[in-house]
Amino acid sequence: MAASGRIAFLEGTYPSANMALVRGERPVLVDTGYGSDLPRTERLLRENGTPPERLALIVNTHYHCDHVGGNSGLQNRYGLPVAAHRWEAAMVNHRDREACSAEWLDQPVEAYAVDRPLSEGDELDTGGVTLRVLHTPGHTLGHISLWAPEEGVLILGDAVHGDDVAWINPFREGAGAMVRALETLERLSRLPARRALSGHGPPIEDPRAAFDAARRRYERWLREPEKACWHACKRIFAYALMIYGGLGRDEVRPYLLRCPWFHDFAKNGLGLRPEEFVGPLLDEMLRSGAAGWREGRLVALAPHNPPPEGWLTGPARPRDWPEPGRRGA
């Protein structure tokens, strides 16, 4: 599906986020999906007239695994450079244990490096489209969006979704994350965007309406912060069920109790002992339709491509990544 003649929208299926291919003499791929979906990413690029080896640059909107998971394979196979906000670039390149929130979220990310740190106002020229870097914190501190003024297209990452909002993580992205997300929405709403591409869901044909709806929801969460906690927990747990192929009845409780995100939201977000939160979260997952029991396993009900067993070929936590000079092809 095309966003404009020069910006192609590459729709992702969970666990991958959407991607955008910005065409030109120096084509840019914005985000790379989940690691196990790399063959699909390569196929989509070829189907859209730009085989991976022709890319000039990968740009990540932020460092969560559904947006950066293909980086490792694309760097190792094709030598492609990666660009990201300078704060997240530093964490990735230092193999900081907080990078990608991989340990906190229990989400695997194979080793990659950021070659080009980005800051607010930087411009990327594909030879066909000029992309302006916008620092859009909220979902993560180093989140960026890309504005193509001549096209009237915003590439949002997880700053805004058409039918949902990004979950907010005050424990790893700062206590003011919700306020920063609102400031991001206000700033984006002032741009004359005719179309916006989100990290999840279809293209947004009425960006201003989407920004207004997201703002109203975040404002409610400021008044009722427990709603933000529930939203985040359901999204994170559903994603875990997707990438791990579901959990057996006797696996749910031990899994949740070993996850740092679950402890933070239970204790610091909802004022509960983690042991007290297992049952209520499971009940809400079932009630809301986010998950269901299938042949004795709790599985995510949203459409997704379960990763094949054995797809990981290297360490999946940044602190365990090899030093850049020792990473194999």
Image (cartoon, rainbow, N blue to C red):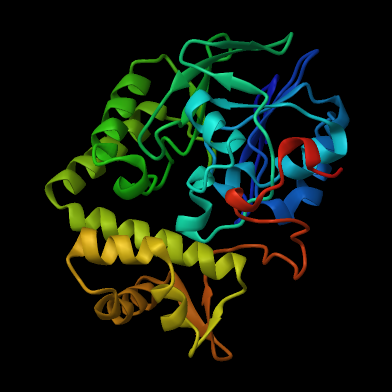
Q: Quadrant of the C terminus?
A: top right
Residue 132 higher or lower than 291, as above or below: above
Residue 321, how many percent across, how many down? Answer: 67, 48
Residue 217, how many percent across, how many down? Answer: 25, 44
Decide if residue 151 is on the left or right side of residue 170: right
Decide if residue 172 is on the left or right side of residue 237: left
Residue 94, how many percent across, how many down? Answer: 58, 36
Residue 5 higher or lower than 305, as above or below: above
Q: Nearer the viewer, residue 45 or 85?
A: 85
Q: Is residue 201 visible?
A: no
Decide if residue 164 is on the left or right side of residue 175: right
Farthest residue in the left direction?
223
Decide if residue 8 is on the left or right side of residue 299: right
> At 52% from the left edge and 66% from the top edge, which residue is drawn?
240
Q: Nearer the viewer, residue 196 or 17?
A: 17
Residue 224, how many percent across, how many down? Answer: 14, 52
Q: Nearer the viewer, residue 225 or 259?
A: 259
> At 31% from the left edge and 34% from the top edge, which residue is drawn?
181
Q: Is residue 148 visible?
A: yes
